[in-house]
Image: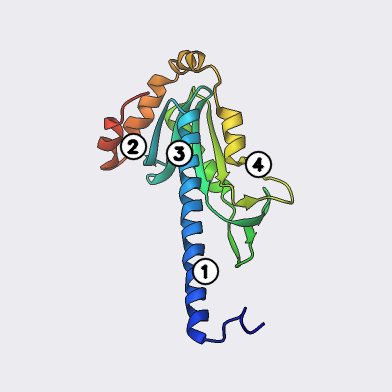
């Protein structure tokens, strides 16, 4: 038995270091794969997209939108939540809780902020459907029910994906002038970058 378990302390330190390095590599690969999948899904369901824009919020201020997509169903605001563990939240709870093996933490219910973002976009494009989703990446799990406007990547793709891309391009033609209004309303130095992004 002593031959199987080394008694030299330096051997244990090296083995522990190797385990830590392997764990870090696994976490980096997993996070990168999750980010790549997110980009693929957003690209698949959108005909054009702007990321990280500021828009007027109607109260002489501005509001940041992480991802705004032009889809065959209208405009879609996507807020990404990258948390790992079991998420406990509901429409009426002020604080949502995440419990994982490593820790437990709470964060403010993200739905009201999403409603504010939807309202800001609707002020600019009054005749176009505007929707929003809180997208929790694959490491999150809702075991007690999924609150309104919360989706995973699979649900987002199923709900907003357009299987007939040619028909989808025809649908978005009606949305294009309104989409351009949103792009022009973007505040600050980001406007130049947004204008430089080619339309799909």
Q: In this view, does 95 lie above or below 188?
A: below
Which residue matches tag 3?
39
| Residue 81 image point, x, y percent | 53, 50
Q: Judge left or right: residue 120 versus residue 92.
A: left
Specify which label sits upstream in the sequence, 2 or 1.
1
Instruction: Provide the secondary structure element on which disc 1 rests.
Output: helix
Spatial distance from mark 3 to mark 4, Cα to Cα?
A: 23 Å
Specify which label sits upstream in the sequence, 3 or 2.
3
Which residue matches tag 4?
148
Spatial distance from mark 3 to mark 2, Cα to Cα?
A: 22 Å
Residues at discs 2 and 1 in contact (Cβ within 8 Å)? no
Spatial distance from mark 4 to mark 2, Cα to Cα?
A: 28 Å
| Residue 22 image point, x, y percent | 49, 63
Q: Could you say which quadrant of the image residue 178 lies in?
A: top left
Instruction: Provide the secondary structure element on which disc 3 rests.
Output: helix
Instruction: Provide the secondary structure element on which disc 4 rests.
Output: loop
Of tags 4 and 2, the one toward the viewer is: 4
Which residue matches tag 2?
186
Specify which label sits upstream in the sequence, 1 or 3.
1
Whether residue 139 is visible, yes or no, is: yes
Of tags 1 and 3, the one toward the viewer is: 1
Image quadrant for the C terminus? top left
Q: Could you say which quadrant of the image residue 159 lies in?
A: top right
Q: Nearer the viewer, residue 117 or 72?
A: 72
Residues at discs 4 and 2 in contact (Cβ within 8 Å)? no
Q: Which residue is drawn at 67% across and 53% down?
A: 89
Mark 2: few, some, or many residues within 10 Å (few <14, many ≥20)? many
Which residue matches tag 1?
19
Q: Which residue is drawn at 58% across and 35% down?
A: 156
| Residue 175 image point, x, y percent | 44, 20
Q: Nearer the viewer, residue 146 or 163?
A: 163
């Amino acid at each position: 038995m002593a031959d199987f378990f080394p008694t030299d302390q330096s051997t244990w330190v090296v083995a522990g270091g190797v385990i830590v390095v392997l764990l870090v590599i696994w976490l980096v690969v997993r996070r990168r794969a999750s980010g790549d999948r997110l980009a693929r899904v957003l690209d698949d369901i959108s005909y054009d997209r702007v990321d990280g824009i500021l828009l007027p919020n109607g109260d002489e201020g501005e509001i940041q939108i992480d991802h705004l997509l032009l889809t065959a169903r209208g405009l879609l605001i996507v807020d990404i939540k990258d948390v790992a563990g079991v998420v406990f939240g509901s429409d009426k709870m002020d604080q949502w809780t995440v419990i994982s093996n490593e820790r437990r933490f709470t964060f403010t219910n993200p739905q009201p902020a999403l409603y504010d973002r939807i309202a800001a976009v609707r002020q600019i494009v009054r005749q176009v459907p505007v929707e929003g989703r809180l997208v929790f990446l694959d490491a999150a799990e809702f075991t007690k029910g999924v609150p309104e406007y919360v989706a995973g990547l699979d649900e987002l793709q199923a709900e907003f994906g357009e299987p007939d891309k040619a028909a989808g391009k025809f649908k978005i033609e009606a949305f294009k002038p309104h989409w351009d209004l949103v792009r022009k309303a973007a505040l600050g130095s980001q406007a130049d970058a947004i204008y430089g992004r080619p339309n799909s």
